[in-house]
Image (tube, grey):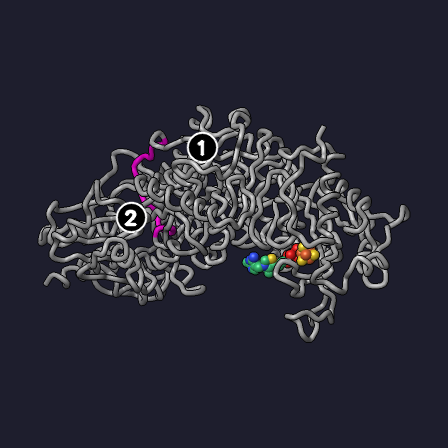
Amino acid sequence: MTSSKSTIDILVALDKESISTHEAELATQGIIVYDQFMLKERYYGDRFLDIPLIELAEKHGRERVMANTVAVGAVLGMLGLGTDIFFGIIEDTLNKKGSEIVKLNKDAFLAGYEFAVKRCLQCAFTVKPQNKPRMLIGVNEAIGLGAIASGCKFYSAYPMTPSTGIMLYVAGKAKEYGIVVEQAEDEIAAINMAIGASYAGVRSMTGTSGGGFALMVEGLSLAAMTETPIVIALAQRPAPATGLPTKTEQGDLLFALHGGHGEFPRVIFAPGSPEQAFYLTNKAFDISQRYQIPVFILTDQYLSDSQWTEGDFDINKFVHKDYRIRGDSLEAIKDYRRHAITEDGVSPFGVPGTSTRLIITDSDEHDEEGHITEDPEIRVSMVDKRLFKKMGLIKKEISPPLFYGDEKPDIVLFGWGSTYGVMKEVVDIISRHYKIAMFHFSEVFPLPSTEMLDYIGILRGAKKTICIENNATGQFSRLIKAETGYEFTHHINRFDGKPFFADLLARRIDGINR
Amino acid sequence: MVSIDDFKGKTPAWCPGCGNYSILRAFKETLVELDIAPHEFTIVSGIGQAGKFPHYLRCNTFNGLHGRTLPVATGIRLANHRMPVIAVAGDGDCYGEGGNHLIHAIRRNIGVKLFVHDNQIYGLTKGQASPTSMEGVVTKNQPFGVLSGQLNPIALAVALDCSFVARSFAGDIIHLKQMMKEAINHRGFALLDILQPCVTFNKVNTYEWYRQRVYHLGDNYDPKDRISAFEKSLEWGERIPIGVIYENKRQTFEERIPVIKDRPLIDHEIFTEGWRNSLQKALDEFF
Ligand SMILES: Cc1ncc(C[n+]2csc(CCOP(=O)(O)OP(=O)(O)O)c2C)c(N)n1
Ligand code: SF4
Ligand SMILES: [Mg+2]
């Protein structure tokens, strides 16, 4: 499974409200677990499983609070998952509290487990056992880990849901990996601090959500003008303004693309899973250092607040290249100029204080040395260097989208970022009925060239092309049209604050094709 | 040994007679006397007449945005606290647009030295009121006179327990040099507010006006006493004290961050064999 669906298989109701709110969402085979003594109410019918959670807790776990453990036991029993995994976890986490506590937890768990195995006759769930251990990881952690493993040494941010998890993860590892994490007084300070640290020679990053990014845009433009590398994680949530702080939306693609005054190069990545986030964070750091530009990692609340099981991540695939010039190598450049005009537009990235060379830069237009100027010729050559020369090269770094499904599809699903999992699942669900395929973009700007994978050609060859976006206006669709001229035949947009669910999305696509 | 010529930069475009010239001269002489070479420190400046300061010098320079000198300077210090970092800003730059950053830089006690060229006016944008303009002063943009109260940066800094608070006057180079030296040598954040006549747009606070009022704090004054510092900080009008008004020995931010206490961040090597091997542990935690 790579996405959420709209229905619930097992609902553990610890109060009556949980039943009244969620009963309608129960799957056909779904079951509601409750305790008639806890809820002081009896429910009738096949879909209700009455388990004496409190009684079993008091009897086997000695205390009422153990009802939670009994419930976990019941769920695992219903799923037929065995007791080993849970026992292992209990031992790992509760060992500090002594063997007595471990035993009580195990007994309570077992009571729930056995009860469910005996009584849940209509339980038809099967869960495939995993033969190899897998990671349990969220996107914010994957970005934080990716940043640390890319040599990030400085993270400054102002807390804002749903981006805060990245800062929390990095802060938790600050001591071990030697990272300075600073909670800035506001987002303006956050990005300016990161730019300062980056100028001084350490890899730096900031993270925020739409409202905070609105405060950062002047700093973004500063990073561009001073050619100071920076990585910005932008975790989207529904806006305008404070919007729906704990819900999801893909509403800031065009904001990330156009934010900041003036014209300058930037790169935007939009991972669709922790695995993509991990590797793209490394690519973000590498490209940002190499071309001395801002690079975005765009996520959203759905991605940020979910946990995935993933196979192993391989750090050996990371690019670990140091583009800085320091000490003797900097000293050796006789006529060092921070913004020297070079063939590829990239000037030597000198680090101040490591040699007698001076590192000078300016938010005003500047000459090669870095000093303020209004000379029109220098202005034009700087724009040429900063923007045009670099942009051509950066475009070559961008990987093609992921193509999945029928090779010559009639229907093409098109999306970016967090819709990766749900689109893939939908392709699997409806490929029995249709010749269907999907394109998923995790590198969204600049758009990948069509040389390696002619996605525009495949779109043109299909009968129905559906751009699926978690926003109201189809921002990616507009970007595709602006850059390639291609117009989708259909759009599916969701902007009620919820992610797409595989079953509902499949139905909508089915509807389009009927 | 460094000499004045080592710091020769572009020819300043300031108006003849501008107080910035003497600040520039005082600064160069201070560097020579402290024997600090151009590559050994960094100036972060904002936007305004004061913001152009580093271009008229020769040194590592980050001329950033209007109001944002302190966050950039803080980032540089956190990356490399072996390097002296001096923030140069105007009164509008630092007390207006970037006021919030001042409060928090003082709270952190980050080892940045902030020199404010306080001309009590917006010079670059041609004469609007600044936060330190005196109440009632009429400008083209304030035809009814300045209605808001005058910001008192010295009192603000003392209230925040700033570890070094001083005022000097561009018309008293010897004093100014002394204050610059003490600020640079101070451990922790230093605020040096420099009264700087703007001969073109501030017709009230002229050289003459300042000369009649400023006086040196004598040897009897104890800058370590916070209550008397408060009292001193409130003096403005007929008499304006210059000198170190308040000083304390609070620990610096850099000293309190365990990660960089012993070694600046810039010295932490990345991409080494040992560093790469250490990463696996963080990955394994997810299994
Ligand atoms: C974000 C932003 N707002 C406004 C300006 C325009 N601006 C440039 S300098 C300045 C004020 C200058 O006053 P001050 O900081 O006191 O410096 P001075 O010129 O007096 O030295 C203003 C408003 C700007 N550059 N950036
Ligand atoms: S306008 Fe005022 S501050 Fe600016 S250069 Fe002229 S005198 Fe100096
Ligand atoms: Mg001013």
Q: Position of residue A300 (x, y in %)?
A: 37, 54
For badge 2, the amino acid type reads Leu
**Magenta stretch?**
A303-315
Circle 2: is it few (<14), some (14-19), or many (20+) Cα within 10 Å?
A: many
For badge 1, the amino acid type reads Tyr
Residue shown at 22%/45% (left/top)?
A: A450
Query: Which label is found at residue A323?
Result: 1
Say if the magenta span includes residue A306.
yes
Quadrant in the picture for residue A5: bottom left
| Ligand 1 placement by image quarter | bottom right
Of all residues, the one furthest to the bottom in this rendering is: B144
Residue shown at 24%/39% (left/top)?
A: A129
Q: Is residue A41 above or below residue A397?
A: below
Q: Is residue B249 above or below residue B238?
A: above
Q: Position of residue B239 (x, y in %)?
A: 85, 60
On the rendered structure, is A508 left or right of B39? left
Residue assigned mark 2: A447
Judged from the image, the secondary structure of the residue bearing numbered disc 1 is loop
Q: Position of residue A474 (x, y in %)?
A: 28, 61
Which chain does tag 2 point to?
A
B217 and B213: which is toward the camera:
B213
Q: Quadrant of the C terminus of chain A?
A: bottom left
Say if residue B153 shows up in the picture: yes
